[in-house]
Image (spheres, rainbow, N blue to C red):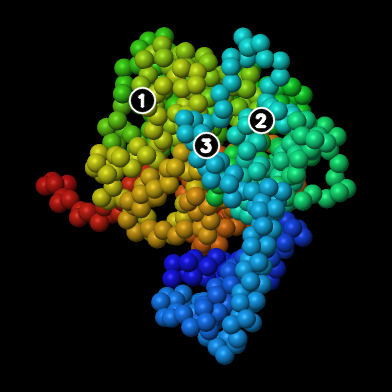
Amino acid sequence: MIGDLAGVVFTVGVIWAILRRYVQRPYRIRIKTKPEHAAILGVLLGIGVTGFGAEAFRIAEQSASGTNMDFEKWSFVGYPLAQIFDGASVGTLENWHQIWWVAHVLTFVAFLLLLPITMLRHIFTSPLNMYLKDRDRPKGAMKAMPNLTETSLESFGAAVVEDFTWKQLLDTDACTMCGRCTSVCPAHATGKPLDPREIVLKTGEVMAATAAHAEGGRVSPPIGTDKEITIGANSLFERITAEEVWACTSCKACDEICPVNIEILDKILDMRRYLSLMESNFPAELGNAYRAMENQGNPWGMNQGDRADWAKDLDVEVVDPGSPLQTEYLYWVGCAGSFDDKNKKVTQSMAKLLKRAGIDVAVLGPSEMCTGDSARRSGNEYLFQMLAMPNVEMLNGMGVKKIITQCPHCFNTLKNEYPQLGGNYEVVHHSELLEQLIASGQLDMSGATLDDRITYHDSCYLGRHNDVYMAPRKVVGSIKGVQIVEMPRNGTKGMCCGAGGARMWMEESIGTKVNDERAREALSTGATRVATACPFCYIMLDDGVKAAGAEEDAVKVADIAIHVLDALENGERNASADAPLSAPVAGE
């Protein structure tokens, strides 16, 4: 019974796969279908069918020879099939049993022959790849590099196959070619040249075509390649273009959805390191951001002395980095929160909310420099270290233990990457802190109310990079009167705003703008408010909503801190309007 059950599941699964590949034909599967797939599926189907055929003729032959086969009723497929051949001679049934048995063995031999030379080898390499995944490095952190001012390395990043780790190369054999990464990539969905699956497969092609240890200098790639494609060297850029590499938003959607833990983003970022550090081959607009970070300490190119201007009318302490930090938290405002007009309002709202909750914080003001996220995600490790090392030295010198951020990019860098440089802090995103304050009652939301339909957009660096999904939703959900709706793509499958991976500083000239696509999805929910928890998302979605023709008084895009403060102030206005008039004083 167990054998037949397994056989039915196997055979039905193969038939389902055939129908999906050749009848339903979804795009991500259709574009990679090769003749070898028909051979694989045909062999697998043959194993299932011949197995049941051999079983049926065995039972029929033994029954015809007088053996009591009632116990075979447990073979709920083989036994009924055997009844079809009642009345046939023992010799005939024995011959047919041998034929089906030989066919069953031959199909299995064919399976063994296909196993090492086709994508079937992922049956072994995929579980191995999943077991060997990097468990030490935080999910949102890039691979560490040595101090570039002291290292003896002569090349940085990945330009040839040998520059990748053995685990990154194992990825290419572990890939099941399912195309899930392709289906969720925001760059691919909006017409950009990037296809995450192609990054993996092309790497595998170059590796297979330049296998010096093998006879003939090559081994079979995981999937059949077109004969017209020639690979003359072990350079990754024989098959992968710079345009593909720079189209990535580093949203990690491909890594998140991959069923076998393939590190696609790491490969792209390693190639960016080579292009940026070794060839200076990066988009021209990115050069402006590099110069601004190097000269002004922020990618906006603004005067560092203006960093604390947002706090002029607020009771916020700007501390001297030469003195120990006296408050429990250091509020790391970030470049956007300090210089961008939209995000200054987020910073001010957050400062007001912290004051309401009785939380004392201090800010660094002009002493705060960019954390270096955009520099690192665009491959410029040298600039990242130039920004990050002084930050770490300053924070350690002040004795900083706890940091609040409102930017997920700062949050991810401070929490997951500064430890690589000796900076270990307890970093909390403002959505997490607000959730804690509301849950504990320190921030009283009992009167907070809004009469709105609201949808929340997941930040990639808060969600997929750090698994913070519920905190901002709980914050928004604490507002009375709101109707919360989710966009079709949300949570782990949320769509990027288009600004990650330093794309904030690059122009989009190919296909649809990612933020326009995401803004249309937000508007399709009928929401009158769009909540974000990232300064880049705020800018990109606000621009996208306006580009779609929605007026600000019809759809308000804002950070969760602004929505919460709006709700609190709205509740206070309603309460004062409903309060009874005081009795007139005698003589007036």
Q: Looking at the image, is mark 1 or mark 3 earlier in the sequence?
A: 3
Marks 1 and 2, Cα distance to the nearest angstrom?
A: 36 Å
From the image, state whether disc 1 or disc 3 is nearer to you. 3
From the image, state whether disc 1 or disc 2 is nearer to you. 2
For numbered disc 3, what is the local secondary structure?
loop
Tell me the residue at 33%/34% (across/down).
Answer: 354
Where is residue 370 drawn, in percent x and y?
A: 54, 24
Question: Is 456 situated left or right of 290 in this image?
Answer: left
**Residue beneath disc 3:** 132
Residue farthest toward the bottom in the current orientation of the protein: 87
From the image, state whether disc 3 or disc 2 is nearer to you. 3
Where is residue 378 drawn, in percent x and y?
A: 65, 30
**Residue beneath disc 2:** 164
**Residue beneath disc 1:** 402
- The label shown at residue 18 is none
Tell me if label 1 and label 2 are in contact, CB under 8 Å: no
Q: Dot 2 surroundings within 10 Å: few (below 14), some, or many (20 or more)?
A: some
204 vs 460, nearest the viewer: 204
For numbered disc 2, what is the local secondary structure?
loop
Q: Looking at the image, is mark 1 or mark 2 earlier in the sequence?
A: 2
Could you tell me the amino acid type at mark 2? Answer: Phe
Could you tell me the amino acid type at mark 3? Answer: Leu
